Image (cartoon, rainbow, N blue to C red):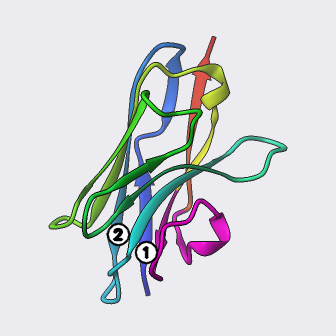
Amino acid sequence: QVQLVESGGGLVQAGGSLRLSCAASGRTFNPYYMGWFRQAPGKEREFVAAISWSSGNTFYADSVKGRFTISRDNAKNTVSLQMSSLKPEDTAVYFCAAKALYGFSRVADAYGNWGQGTQVTVSS
């Protein structure tokens, strides 16, 4: 059983920065990709960023490219999302997710393990 626990959310002014972290545990934790998704009220969950657990290759949604950076620490089983130049439209609950099967995907359903989410609120 894989468990993912996010931390680091909070309230920040527009233009500010936040760093989210996701700690993974479980004997079977060996993903192909780790991803961050977000869900704003009344909206569907959307892809934010993903990273290959082995190669470190990264992928980003166009809306966050150049502002967000995803990274991983394989030794500590953690993945982070550094968010800069935050905008009010970045306000959402952010989820960490693990994809156990081969191949990158931006689709939430392709990720089998999820954290509980952490709230990020950006004030204008």
Label disc, if present, on residue 66 of the rendered structure = none
Amino acid found under the numbered disc labelled 1 = Gln
What percent of the width, then of the height, locates residue 94? Answer: 56, 47
Q: Is residue 100 magenta?
A: yes
For mark 2, what is the residue?
24
At a point 56% along the width and 61% down the height, the residue shown is 116
Amino acid found under the numbered disc labelled 2 = Ala
For mark 1, what is the residue?
3
At a point 35% along the width and 89% down the height, the residue shown is 28
Element type at mark 2: strand
User: With respect to residue 5, does 82 lie above or below?
Assistant: above
What percent of the width, then of the height, locates residue 34? Answer: 41, 64
Q: Nearer the viewer, residue 107 or 7?
A: 107
Element type at mark 1: strand
Quarter holding the C terminus is: top right
At a point 37% along the width and 77% down the height, the residue shown is 31
What percent of the width, then of the height, locates residue 2? Answer: 42, 80
Q: Which residues are magenta?
A: 96-115
Is the residue marked by circle 2 packed among few (<14), some (14-19), or many (20+) residues within 10 Å?
many
Q: Are marks 2 and 1 in contact (CB under 8 Å)?
A: yes
Q: Is residue 93 magenta?
A: no
